[in-house]
Image (cartoon, rainbow, N blue to C red):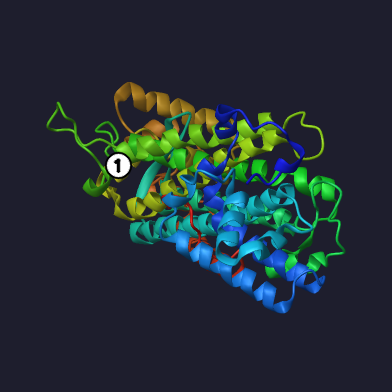
Amino acid sequence: MKMWAGRFREPLDSFFDHWQRSLRFDWQLLPQETAASAAHAEALRAAGVLTAGECEQITSSLAAIAAHYAEQPEAISGNAQAEDIHHFVELNLTERIGDLGLKLHTGRSRNEQIATDLRLYVRESIALLVSRLGAWAEALVSQAKAAGEAVMPSYTHLQRAEPVLVAHWLLAYVEMLLRDVSRLDDCAKRLNYCPLGSGAVAGATLALDRGIAASALDFTAPTANSMDATSDRDFVIEFLQALTMVALHASRFAEEITLFATAEFGFVELPEAFSTGSSAMPQKKNPDLTELVRAKVGRINGAAQWVTLLVKGLPLAYNKDMQETQEPVFAAAVEADRMLQVLAPFTRAVKFRADRMRAACEAGYLNAMAAATYLVHKGVPFRKAHEKIGNAVRYGLDSGRELNDLSLEELKQFGPEFEGDFFAAITLEATLDCHDVTGGTARHRVKAALADAERRIETLKETSVIQEVETTHAGA
């Protein structure tokens, strides 16, 4: 039986009927649909529509449906009768408890049901992804601690710039991930209002206490406007845009690891457990994991663009177009989850070649900035110090020597300020430690930053807006 068949005389075109159904993808909302339906039942009980016994029978049956299909989710999408997950649950409920199941739709609309289910799904996805981001951040911190005072070149314009601690480079990605967490938490705060009781567009036709359902589902409060509640998909776009940032950060990390693993760099050794070989060239060890991570940003950002363009220009309130917002949400959430699942163990398994990185820091005049700073301390204006060291670098290039290989006499031709203490000021350790500012790569600053990162990750676990919850993502 159709949920809306009474007004129609003619049957639906069979092809259109199957084409317009959403059960093939919204079956993933079964846990959210049964939870939201149970919360609505409690509101109906309080309104006197259901007795306490009827409410108990409905809510226990909803729990049984959720438990039954959790074991065999594939059985949901193959249902020949149900149009969508809401219809599927109603059919299952009436099979179990007869016409009592039909009472559950009193005072509500599918428009508010899907708005609620999607909010619950996104909220649970955020909780899971925050947990995954925390695990990856911990893996980065673990590698940073293990790296100790190992050094590597930093780059600007993909040219060697200055030496930094490997830990400093790793902690840069930790900062990105913590920003990702804050964006997701912020999204969770904004979406955490309950549409139940909004009806199809103008509000429920019963005097329901909307706070009952909102409280039962751990929402902050009911939504403030029924038209906005049923048509709002801002939270979907915001969620997908936040996932795009997660994927962008993962892609940048993947790109650097891919580069650093090449023979030309040789800074890292790819773990065999996360690499593949070539079917033609026996010597190859390919960075398939990082290459696939790089590619995922296209799929995830594509989902964000999909929903953005879909919502553009839609009049209030609910429109069938909004059914198309679900698939990109499901796909992007699952892709982000799988990507983050693999990145944490991969990061822990990567081996850094400290000797190769140190050698790269000791060639190419990476101490030139420290050398200019030395002259500044001798009273030389920075612009002139920059020029003097630039001249010394050119002289070194012409003779095939680094700054520390030049004699004091040779250096003095560029300025009388050069003294015997110059060479101590441009050692690798001194070059690192001249960046003695908060956020810099001086060794004691990085040690403090590492401790701070550990503290912030621990705080994240305790205070994230949405704590880790069980989810039922397909393939998660």
Amino acid found under the numbered disc labelled 1: Phe
Residue density around tag 1, few if under 14, some if 14–19, many if 20 or more, within 10 Å = many
Left or right: 354, with 256 as reference point: left
Mark 1, residue position:
267
Can residue 438 be seen here?
no
**Residue positioned 25% across, 42% down in the render:** 275
Considering only vertical position in the picture, is 296 above or below 213?
above
**Residue positioned 71% across, 67% down in the render:** 41
**Residue 476 point in image, percent of width and height:** 43, 53
Residue 45, located in which quarter of the rendered image?
bottom right
**Residue 443 point in image, percent of width and height:** 45, 57
Please name whichever residue, 113 or 52, is drawn nearer the observer in this view of the structure. Answer: 52
Left or right: 146, with 298 as reference point: left
Considering only vertical position in the picture, is 416 above or below 129?
above
Please name whichever residue, 145 or 191, is drawn nearer the observer in this view of the structure. Answer: 191
Left or right: 451, with 186 as reference point: left
**Residue 213 point in image, percent of width and height:** 73, 66
Report the residue that reaches farthest toward the left.
282
**Residue 104 point in image, percent of width and height:** 70, 61
- Judging from the image, what secondary structure is the residue with disc 1 in? loop
Can residue 264 be seen here?
yes
**Residue positioned 68% across, 47% down in the render:** 3
Please name whichever residue, 243 or 109, is drawn nearer the observer in this view of the structure. Answer: 109
Considering only vertical position in the picture, is 184 above or below 316?
below
